[in-house]
Amino acid sequence: MTSVRRIFALIATLSLTIGGNAEASEEFEAKNVAVCGAEIAQMCAAVKKGGGRVIQCLQEKVAALSPECKKVVVPDDGAAGKFSIEVTVVAINSKAGSINVMLSDDPDEFPSAPRRMVIVPANAGAVVVTFKHLKPGEYAVMAYHDANENSKFDTGSTPSEGIAVSNNAFMPTFSASAIAVARDTKIKLALNYL
């Protein structure tokens, strides 16, 4: 199989797994509405449901959350969870849709089941997201431009959608994409449009 065919086969697989993750994010939101119901109604009522958007809204307002809701919204890595990864996603070709950024610390689950996912509106050029409260370790990051906002990466779609993996890895395996985090870290991901 040629390299190009391998890439397209992998992207087809990712389209299915990433789409499944958006559904998992919605399920996560639904399971925790009772814990964060008041905060959602007060601070995030206008946010479009699905794809992790409500959780993202709550994460942005973490200082104002109740202790119970904060435990649901921000994973607690204990005293060791004091680091962050700032991800700058560049080469975004339009402001259509959203940029979905996923973080994984499990080699067996990357890229299909991220530990965390942040969705931000697309902005032609670049966007920046930050994963906070991380313990030291290895993490892999993947971002994709969900231009049509269907919660999956589509090849050959109109508008076109781009994808990037940490370390600019050719194949998104955890070992090729992993970055060591022992302090606050900044990375840049350049989207590739197919």
Image (spheres, grey):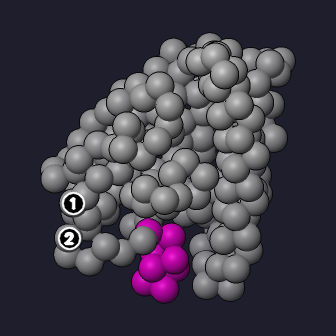
Contact? badges 2 and 1 (CB < 8 Å):
yes
Disc 2 marks a residue whose amino acid type is Ala
Prevailing secondary structure class for the magenta stretch in the rendered image: helix
Q: Is residue 7 above or below residue 141?
A: above
137 with respect to 59 (left or right): left
Label 2, secondary structure: give it.
Answer: helix
Q: Is residue 176 above or below residue 33?
A: above
Q: Earlier in the sequence, mark 2 or mark 1?
A: 2
Counting from the top left corner in percent of width and height, residue 157 is at 82, 21
160 with respect to 87 (left or right): right
Viewer-proximal residue among 138 and 131: 138
Magenta residues span: 67-74
The residue at the point 73 percent across, 70 percent down is 27
Viewer-proximal residue among 57 and 50: 50
The residue at the point 39 percent across, 67 percent down is 63
Disc 1 marks a residue whose amino acid type is Pro
Counting from the top left corner in percent of width and height, residue 34 is at 68, 85
Counting from the top left corner in percent of width and height, residue 31 is at 70, 80
Q: Nearer the viewer, mark 2 or mark 1?
A: 1
The residue at the point 51 percent across, 15 percent down is 91
Label 2: few (<14), some or many (≥20) within 10 Å? few
159 with respect to 11 (left or right): right
Q: Which mark is residue 80?
A: 2
Counting from the top left corner in percent of width and height, residue 59 is at 49, 60
Which residue position holds label 1? 136
Label 1: few (<14), some or many (≥20) within 10 Å? some
The residue at the point 29 percent across, 53 percent down is 138
Viewer-proximal residue among 97 and 162: 162
Label 1, secondary structure: give it.
Answer: loop
On-image quarter of the C terminus? top right
| Distance between mark 2 and mark 1 Cα atoms | 7 Å
